[in-house]
Image (tube, rainbow, N blue to C red):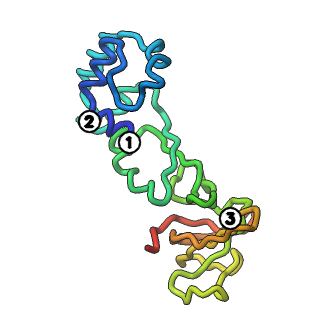
Amino acid sequence: MDMVCYMQEEWDMLLSSIRDGIIPDIDHIDHVREYLQVHMRADPQRADELASIGPPFSFPAWAPRIWPKLNMVHCICSGMFATTLPKMRSMIGPNVVITSPGYGCTECIIGAPFNMADTDVFVVNTTNVVEYLDVVDNQAHENILQAWDLQSGKLYQPVVTTRDGLWRYIIDDMLYVIGFDPRDGSPVFRYHGRKK
């Protein structure tokens, strides 16, 4: 989405560079300009085609008209990144599939998609130790729960100990447990929001 927003802002510069085959003067690329420029070719026909379509947010389902072979977007779309999904869906249209590699945070990966077609549901799947605090309960250390203590329909905050055992984090995300994986009993959850 950042790239598409930048394309929106610099649409005329993008078309000009495609038309002329010259990388524009953009700050902070002097060290790579010569390596990029050798791969740039003038393509006035493509520039005219893009101009006739218009910039990114000129109409819904814009992206498949620009990239006709676009059939899947694979991106992180859990946690805070989920906020961009409605805008992305509007831009890519209803026929492009969105998949997610999983649910994670800065500290570690916590879950994998439970079903690749559903970007909202994850199953805990990690080599790290994940424990939980009930969001509405007293969040004291002695109230830490294990996966088998969780209940469907409740909110939990993950507590993650990384593989080396050196770091233990209380993650500020709230996870809504919707069930358990029939294969191994791991919690299946939806991201609910941030605690703070």
* Marks 1 and 2, how far apart at CA: 11 Å
Between 193 and 150, the one nearer to me in the picture: 193
Viewer-nearest of discs 2 and 3: 2
Of the two numbered discs 1 and 3 on the same chain, state the one appearing first in sequence. Answer: 1
Q: Secondary structure at mark 2?
A: helix
User: Taking 71 as reference, is 49 above or below it?
Assistant: above
Residue occupying the point 32% across, 33% down: 7
Query: Which residue matches tag 1?
Result: 2
Of the two numbered discs 2 and 3 on the same chain, state the one appearing first in sequence. Answer: 2
Residue 43 in the figure: left or right of residue 184: left
Between 46 and 38, the one nearer to me in the picture: 38
* Marks 1 and 3, how far apart at CA: 35 Å
Between 94 and 124, the one nearer to me in the picture: 124
User: Taking 102 as reference, is 153 above or below it?
Assistant: below
Query: Which residue matches tag 2?
Result: 9
Q: Amino acid at mark 3?
A: Asp
Residue occupying the point 51% across, 71% down: 172
Q: Amino acid at mark 1?
A: Asp
Picture disc at residue 181: 3
Q: Position of residue 17 (x, y in %)?
A: 32, 18
Q: Quadrant of residue 150?
A: bottom right
Q: Position of residue 173 (x, y in %)?
A: 51, 69
Q: Quadrant of residue 113?
A: bottom right
* Marks 2 and 3, how far apart at CA: 45 Å
Between 189 and 183, the one nearer to me in the picture: 189
